[in-house]
Image (cartoon, rainbow, N blue to C red):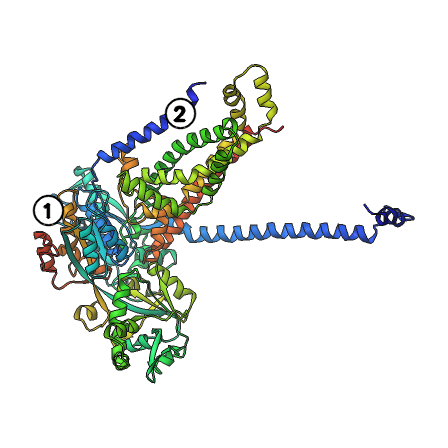
Amino acid sequence: MTDASTNSAPAARKGASLHRTDPRTRRRNGAERRFRLYGAAAISMGLLFLCVLAVSIIRSGAPAFTHAVVEVEFTLSEAQFEEAESQLLKTAVYERYFNAALTAQLRDAGFDVAFDENTIRRIIGKTGGTIRSYYRADPDRVGESVTLDLPVSSRVNGYIKGRVTRENLLDSRFLTQADLDLVDAMRDRGLIETKFNWGFLTGKDSGVDNPGGAGIGASVVGSFFMMLVVLVLSLPIGVAASIYLEEFAPRNWFTDMIEVNISNLAAVPSIVFGILGLAVFIQFMHLPQSAPLVGGLVLTLMTLPTIIISTRASLKAVPPSIRDAALGVGASKMQSVFHHVLPLAMPGILTGTIIGLAQALGETAPLLLIGMVGFVARQYPDGVVDGFLDPNSAMPAQIYTWASRADPAFYEKAWGGIIVLLVFLLAMNIVAIILRRRFERRW
Amino acid sequence: MASRPTLPALALALTMLSATGAVAQTRDNVQVAGSSTVLPYASIVAEAFGENTDFPTPVVESGGSSAGLARFCEGVGENTIDIANASRAIREGEIAACAANGVTEIIEVRIGYDGIVFASRVDGPDIDAFEPADWYLALAERLPLNGTMLANPNRTWADANPDLPDVEIAAYIPGTKHGTREVFEEQVLLAGCEDVGALQAMLDMGLSEDEAEDACVSVRTDGSAVDIDGDYTETLARIESNPQGVGVFGLSFYENNTSTLKAATMGGVEPTAQTIASGEYPVSRPLFFYVKKAHLGVIPGLKEFTSFFVADPLAGPKGPLANYGLVSDPELAETQAKVENEITLSQEGL
């Protein structure tokens, strides 16, 4: 401190009241006020972006959860069943029978709109697959009169939801303006209803000409098995590695190097792990392509550094006095770690793990190289082993695939998929917060 | 506390077990990769195949013709793909690369034709009638002017052709890993280059034929032409953000997006399934897939899938592929026979 400052401060104070702020205090107070304003502005900007994001996601994605269905009474005769099953493209035959039945039914109902079977074909989506699996599941239904709820085609669906309008619809072989008259007439009579689309939550991917049949369920299962692999591998390996590094390993250049490399690994772009996975797991170890097991292994590599870093941080946060006390009453080093330090570090470790998992759940890039991005429309796996080994997609991969398809109806599905993915991420983060709140200790 | 450290060991052992189990297991599904233009058709067939047979639904990946063929040529075996989709014919070099890795028997299957459509935003300027020459003059990197090669001076479409509107050139063309690019270069740029006499001019300047052809198809890099390495949705997004942009699309993609896009005529012909099938529309290409013969009979369902793909109810003019925008092949019967008899490229004398 200089002489000038020690002399001038009391001089300035002389005669000044504490109740009246001098210019310097005012300046300091002003700076603080401005800083608070900046902070509040930053928070509100963040909130604004979040709101815009949330609103746009929900607005674009919500339509994916409902779809328009036609309720039709339908009887498939034994002869028709035999005929259809003898063909190569069986589903097309079922579709034809169904469309003919619906045409007849509408004619009986006496609509004053001109239509023919082609009109019906354009209005009703691809139904053959659904009808065939319905009858194959229970052959006794053949010959009986059943009521089927079948989704309308993607463009009609878009018209009912307001995505397709009469103004922007050009007549094409997919849909014509005249078809919409029949759609309107059917809606007036309550033949077309909007219902919750359970198929979207439980179904699998569908071909590009059948957006109505696409669902995210199968890829949720794929993601689940991947996360299982990641959890089972990265939690024990990550925790064991960090306990060793933090509590037991000697401090020397070698452990320092490991430490630096772990931090480096955490920053490696995820696509690199994908290439590694392709080279090591598929080409060298001959694991199957497009399998959640391989996806899980790749994502484990990606998640490990995150878990190690967060585990080490929470181990470090346990005060040395705990260790000293344990050692003081005669515990071995290992007992002090496993009886005292690890339980206290657990909330942090779990939070880190869950956040690492959430990150892995939303990862697409590494999956691109191991064949999980594309058209993967398998049935649900038959068992646990199949769940790991059968080709499957993952949620973010499925969303990516949908977003790149020509029919705008898939774009809607992609947004719907984003909502499902966000729900999972939100749930995982909430679990992490609850665990932290419940078990957190402060010293 | 001895039980805790064994947990990771247990987990490791578990994965090792499952890993060895996987090696023993035979792949039960067909694995396909390649052209993003063929992908939609392949996915339609794959879904139908899963619905109509007891085989599992094949897995179809995207990535572009070249990338698909590269993976196809990695070798023979369960951990390699069975089928490569391509929007162009396989090249000599690729056949050689395949052979070097033991993939000697390849069956070529042509599934039909696809038109290449030049489209702009439906509410954009009227950029709606092209000649191949317009594209050459608009996109060439250097043009032969007054006896020398000069950097392309054309800034607007009107510079290339006074009949076109005076809007800045912004073309979104498929990147080099797409098979579509090759067709675009050959049938549009090279054709345009010949039409305006530029090819001849370059030959007169003393360039060799190869050099001249390379000059015809080399695209300017000053930002007027943008390579799209993704698929058509990326091109669509670029057009949506730039109302003056013109993009290169497949016919089926365009037909699915007529509410945002309008197609331009090429050489005065409108792109439709009819004009492409009849050959009137000048820019179209055959679509292929390539099958590893060594995998037939090894991978369950591969032979069935291959025959199913080209069967009349699917690839025929009334099938779901045609309904989605594929121009069906008039010589489909020959392809079917070829698939049935498993005729490879070498047997065809190629």
Chain of the residue where label 1 is placed in the rendered structure: A
What residue is drawn where x is 83% and y is 50%?
A21
The circle on residue A267 is none
Residue A34, percent from left and from top: 70, 53
Nearer-the-camera pick, A250 or A17 = A250
Residue ranking furthest to the top? A330
Q: Amino acid at mark 2?
A: Leu
Tell me where residue A400 appears, x and y as whole percent.
Answer: 36, 51
Q: Are marks 1 and 2 on the same chain?
A: no
The image quarter containing residue A122 is bottom left
As helix, strand or loop, the secondary structure at mark 2 comes to helix
Number of labels in the image equals 2
- On the image, the x and y values in percent for residue B211 come to 27, 73
Q: Is residue A124 visible?
A: no
Left or right relative to B94: residue A366: right
Q: Amino acid at mark 1?
A: Ser
Q: Name the residue located 18 percent from the left edge and 49 percent from the top edge.
A: A91
Location of residue A386 in the rendering, given as x and y in whole percent from the top left corner:
27, 35
Q: Measured along the vertical axis of the image, is residue B346 above or below residue B222?
A: above
Q: Secondary structure at mark 1?
A: loop
Q: Which quadrant would the N terminus of chain A be assigned to in this image? A: top right
Residue at the (42%, 68%) spot, across then down: B242
Frontmost of labels 1 and 2 is 2
For label 1, the crowd category at 10 Å Cα-Cα, with few meaning under 14, some 14 to 19 and many 20 or more, is few
Q: Quadrant of residue B325?
A: bottom left
Q: Which residue is mark 2?
A: B7
